[in-house]
Every structure is written in C-alpha cells, then in structure tokens.
C-alpha cells in the first residue's frame, strides 16, 4: 500500500481568549485531537458547519499556525517550526476567495513567479517565466493572460490562477479551503474537474475543506466530519454517504439538495443550543441537539471508534438506534 505523504496524530489547536485584570482567560478549543492520513493521488474531505475547526486545521497543515499538541508528519519527518521554511514548499493552499488572494497591482506573470523568486533564487528570470507559462497552460489559461491583471478575469479564471500559483513550487500536498464556494454553480464543475485532472497528472494529495456535501461527493475519497473541533465521523466517501453512523452526519446529508424529484426529502431539523467551544463539557458535544440523546451522552464523551468507518457516538445509527421521524 502507498505510504501517506502526511500524517496527523491527535492534532489540536487551542487559543486563550479574553482575560484581563479581573477575568481569567478562557481556552477556545478550535481543534481537538484529530487524526488523518493524506495519500498521493487521493482526496481527504473535511466537512462540517461554520466554526467547526476546518480552516484552523488547514492553517496547521499549511504551517501557518503551530499545533498546541499532537504530531504532524510530512514524508516521515516531523513538521516543527524550525523546519517550516524548508517544508512549506511541499504544502500549498488555495483560498476561498480567488480575488482577495491575488494582488490587484501585480500582473499574473509576476504573481506566478513570486514563489520562485522567494524560494528558488537560483533560477534565472527566463526559467521562472518559462515555468509560469507552462503552469498557466496546465490550468487551462492562454499565453496572453500572462501580462494581464486580476481584475480582467472572471471568478473561475481567477481561481485557476490561484491554483496555478499553488503549483509553482511542485507541492506534494494541496489544501483546498472552500475552493469553489465563491463561484457560480455553472463554473464550479469546471474548477472541480480541473482539480481532479491535476491530481491524476501530478499525483497530488488533497485536503478538501467544504461545507457543501454535494461537492464533496464529487471529489472525495475519504471524509472527516467535524463538530466543534472534534472529528465525529470518518470513513470512505462511499460508506459515509451510503450509511452515516453519527446523527450529525445524517443531519448534514439530509440538508443536501438532491436532483431526484422522487427521492426521499425528509429533512432533519436540529434543535437545541449549540455548546460554546470554550465549554469543556464532560459528555458528547452534540448531545444538546441530538434526537437520540440518553443520560450517558451528557456524562461521557464517546470515543471515535468503529475501524475504517468510525463514529464518535454512544449509539451509532447502524447499531439499532432509530432515526428521527
């Protein structure tokens, strides 16, 4: 079996929030003990509501923020701050807003060559330009686009430019943080197809962060479902979509639009209060909103268990628990 290019073990990120002369700072647990493997040519999707810790996880993977605890490995070597300058070329990110991530005062050619200027100073100007033009062609843009400015492109073209910039340093891992959510639906499929094609050509490992499960269904190989910083369900795309084990995952899937007029349209509407991420509650964080909740759910936090398709639930849906009606 192919070895993972990146591995995370019990990865966590906490922040100290508030505090002052008379108040003690509280701990915001943005990500709590998340495990994953990224394989060449495969896509790991991280899904969940806004505020669940997806983007914080992305910032740790891309070495923007240091984990509070846990271990991150790249090609079998520990990812520690002392080695960040050397390792960052292997992990690149594509941001959600393709216009906000591009310098409006720079031409596209300059934007693409900038990573080489910083990280490959030994390359000549001619070599940098040749590389940038090759990558521009690879993402489906024309040679004349090299000398234009970002405002002269559509949203889909700007996202292609952002993808091209991420590829300039020949990374092994690409983190895609909501890469199509800011685009028109008609353009999303072309960008997704481009990403799939690039992965096949270059053998890239993707971490695809999204709240849109219809998009995840198209691109993912494996899925992590996050809730308040925790991984509550993990498994292959096929197993998670076919038979979700955690009630939260089932609720997310029920909210996904379907192009099947005759299909089941039952929508699970979650009620109850969302716990504060600063409240270190003893039980399951989903308990206040779960329709399967029992006393043990408030008293004990369930472990992520179940093998290849795991769920952090005392009463996973495949164990005989009844769905909400």
Image: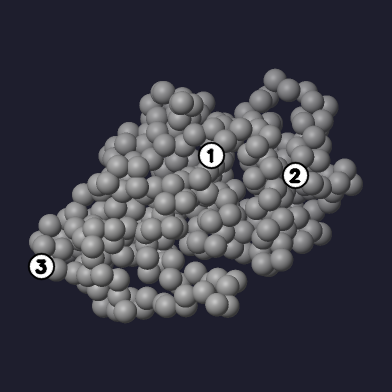
Q: Which mark is residue 295?
A: 3
Image coords of residue 278 (percent x, y): 24, 61
Q: Is residue 89 above or below residue 296?
A: above
Determine which quarter of the picture holds residue 69. Answer: top left
* Crowdedness near tag 2: few (<14), some (14–19) or many (≥20) residues, C-alpha within 10 Å: many
CA separation, marks 1 and 2? 19 Å
The local secondary structure at tag 3 comes to helix
Q: CA distance from mark 2 to mark 3?
A: 54 Å
Q: Which residue is mark 1?
A: 42
Lower position in the chain sequence, tag 3 or tag 1: 1
Q: Hey, which quadrant is residue 123 in on the image?
A: top right
Question: Which residue is identified by label 2?
Answer: 139
Count neighbours of disc 3 (C-alpha within 10 A) and say few if under 14, some if 14 to 19, many if 20 or more.
few
- For marks 1 and 2, the one nearer the N-term is 1
* Residue at 81 percent of width and 59 percent of height: 152
Extreme residue toward the top, this view:
122
Residue 133 lies, in percent from the top left, at 81, 37
Of marks 1 and 2, the one in the foreground = 1
């Amino acid at each position: 079996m192919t070895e993972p290019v990146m591995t995370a073990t019990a990865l966590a990120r906490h922040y100290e929030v508030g505090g002052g002369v008379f108040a003690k700072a509280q701990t915001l647990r943005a990500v709590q003990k998340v495990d994953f493997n990224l394989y060449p040519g495969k896509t790991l999707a991280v899904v969940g509501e806004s505020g669940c810790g997806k983007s914080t996880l992305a910032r740790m993977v891309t070495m923007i923020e240091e984990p509070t605890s846990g271990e991150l490995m790249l090609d079998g070597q520990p990812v520690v701050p002392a080695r960040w300058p050397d390792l960052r070329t292997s992990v690149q990110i594509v941001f959600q807003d393709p216009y906000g991530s591009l310098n409006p005062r720079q031409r596209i050619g300059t934007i693409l060559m900038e990573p080489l200027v910083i990280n490959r100073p030994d390359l000549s100007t001619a070599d940098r330009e040749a590389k940038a033009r090759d990558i521009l062609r690879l993402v489906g843009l024309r040679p004349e686009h090299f000398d234009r400015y970002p405002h002269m492109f559509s949203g889909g073209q700007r996202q292609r430019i952002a993808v091209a910039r991420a590829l300039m340093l020949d990374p092994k891992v690409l983190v895609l943080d909501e890469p199509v959510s800011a685009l028109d639906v008609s353009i999303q499929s072309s960008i997704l197809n481009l990403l799939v094609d690039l992965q096949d050509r270059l053998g890239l490992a993707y971490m695809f962060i999204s709240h849109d499960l219809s998009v995840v269904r198209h691109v993912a190989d494996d899925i992590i479902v996050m809730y308040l910083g925790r991984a509550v369900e993990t498994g292959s795309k096929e197993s998670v979509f076919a038979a979700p084990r955690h009630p939260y995952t089932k609720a997310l899937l029920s909210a996904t639009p379907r192009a099947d007029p005759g299909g089941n349209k039952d929508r699970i509407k979650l009620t109850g209060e969302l716990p504060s991420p600063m409240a270190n509650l003893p039980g399951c964080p989903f308990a206040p909103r779960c329709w399967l909740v029992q006393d043990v759910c408030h008293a004990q936090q369930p472990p992520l268990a179940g093998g290849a398709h795991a769920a952090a639930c005392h009463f996973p849906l495949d164990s005989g628990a009844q769905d909400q009606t």
